[in-house]
Amino acid sequence: MPAVQPDAHGIDRSTLLALAAMGLATVVIANDFTALSVALPAIERDLHSDLSTVQWVINAYALVFGVLIVTGGKLADIFGRRRIFVVGATTFASCSLLGGVAQSVDWLIVCRSLMGIGGALMWPAILGMTYDVLPKAKAGIAGGLIMGACGFGNAVGPLIGGLLTDGLSWRWIFFLNVPVAAFGVLATLTAIPPDTVAQERERLDFGGLTALSLGLVALLLALDQSSAWGWGDPRVVGLLAFGGVLLGVFALAERRVGSAAPLPGDVVGNRDFSAACVSVLLMSAVFFASLLFLPQFMTKALHYSALRGGLGLLPLLGTFAAVSFVAGPLYPRLSPKATVSAGAVCTTVGMLLLSFISRGDHYLSLVPGMVVVGVGLGLFLSSVTTAGVTALDDSRTALAGGIVYMFQIAGGSVGLGLNTAIVTGAGLSVGDFTSGISHAFLLDAALSAIGTAVAVVWVGGRLHAQHHATRHPHLHRAHL
């Protein structure tokens, strides 16, 4: 359901306003993943809680967001992307306001969970509308804009969070979301035409959505708590088993509901899209592990403050944001295969460099690895998102974007579970802790290498097809 039909040669003022609204909304969502990380001690003190409980202020948002994002994509494709975006942004802003006045940690965690619902509705709709307003020839710009804005939001999150927490209060992190979300809604309603109502609306498989959501909650909760409870704990084993059973039931039920399925057959059966999802799943541990353990190394081994640790991530996140924007124009010029593969290779090499981390290292020794990882992720995530989304029919763009991001959250959660088990198993001393980070990063480099192999061989078309197209350039991609 394309919202705007711009020509292939220029971008008009209305399209620019729409892109600005989508970019700003993406910054708000991404910022919320990182801004509160430096505010947790203040929240813990003000709400008279403990760190293990306050950690759920971040975990609840990420868990709900990751679980419901496929549902959000399905709803956006059925009921209209503009409509679902407005519902999601209103939910996000309202619950941000309620979170800002929270009087207990339980109140705050509930608000963060509801914000996760709003974000899960917004994100697929943002992707769908961004690809809609640009012509096919500029699809790479859409992926670059969204992932660039995402990287920028991640990068400035700790800075904004630290400044607001130190200068005003952690509550202003939540209050700031309200006017920004309001601008995004107004700009979207102004620049994006109303959704076209289909004469025959696709139905929803509520049973499948419930089985998928509960199964993912159980699996992600087990992975999140495995470091605290232990992999052999009956609660972890029970959650894993429960999640596995529900996902098995979901897979069996999918066959009978056809296009109403949360993951329709034409989506999961698309080879290029599936390859993009698998490569994202394998490589997402790199991003999540870097965000968690690099600041911890700076805090514990280099004795940085929380805010300075957030600033220390700028070589990675700043490079990621800048390269994501550049990756948009590069995508059509170098081909999906080239940009995705180059990004995957750089990500693997950068993580391998970071795996040599040791107790006596200074901050500058981390910078080359962070920069290379930032370049790699900037090229890879924006390009692989575009490659996956454009592999499907235009009517599936929001759903496709949601599925790709779900694989990113799932891969990050699995990677973090494995990483945390390795790091915490290394011991409590600084030297052992640093050694644990080194081994965890080496595992991430290995997972990234496998993801790179998947990307090089399958994402953006198979290698032999690419070679054939080079020798016979007159053949259309559909013939390969």
Image (cartoon, rainbow, N blue to C red):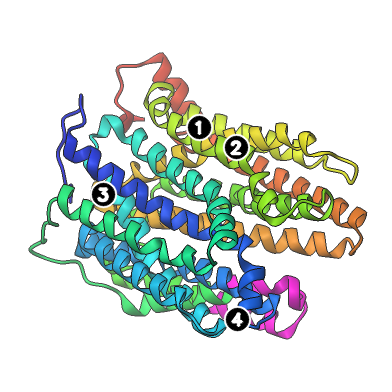
The first of marks 2 and 4 along the sequence is: 4
Which is in the foreground here, disc 3 or disc 4? 4
Residue 222 in the image: above or below residue 459: below
Task: Name which quarter of the figure residue 198 lies in.
Answer: bottom left
Contact check, label 1 and label 2, Cβ < 8 Å: yes
Report, in whole angstroms, how far the alpha carbon at label 4 lies from the one at label 1: 40 Å
Contact check, label 3 and label 4, Cβ < 8 Å: no
Report, in whole angstroms, how far the alpha carbon at label 2 lies from the one at label 4: 36 Å
The first of marks 1 and 2 along the sequence is: 1
At label 3, the amino acid type is: Met
Residues packed near mark 1 inside 10 Å, few (<14), some (14 to 19) or many (20 plus): many
Relative placement, left or right, of 76 versus 447 is left
At label 1, the amino acid type is: Val
Residue 419 in the image: above or below residue 232: above
At label 2, the amino acid type is: Gly
Relative placement, left or right, of 320 versus 262 is right
Q: Which mark is residue 47?
A: 4
Report, in whole angstroms, how far the alpha carbon at label 1 lies from the one at label 2: 8 Å
Q: Residue at x 33, y 68 (%)?
A: 261
Element assignment for label 2 = helix
Residue matched to label 3: 129
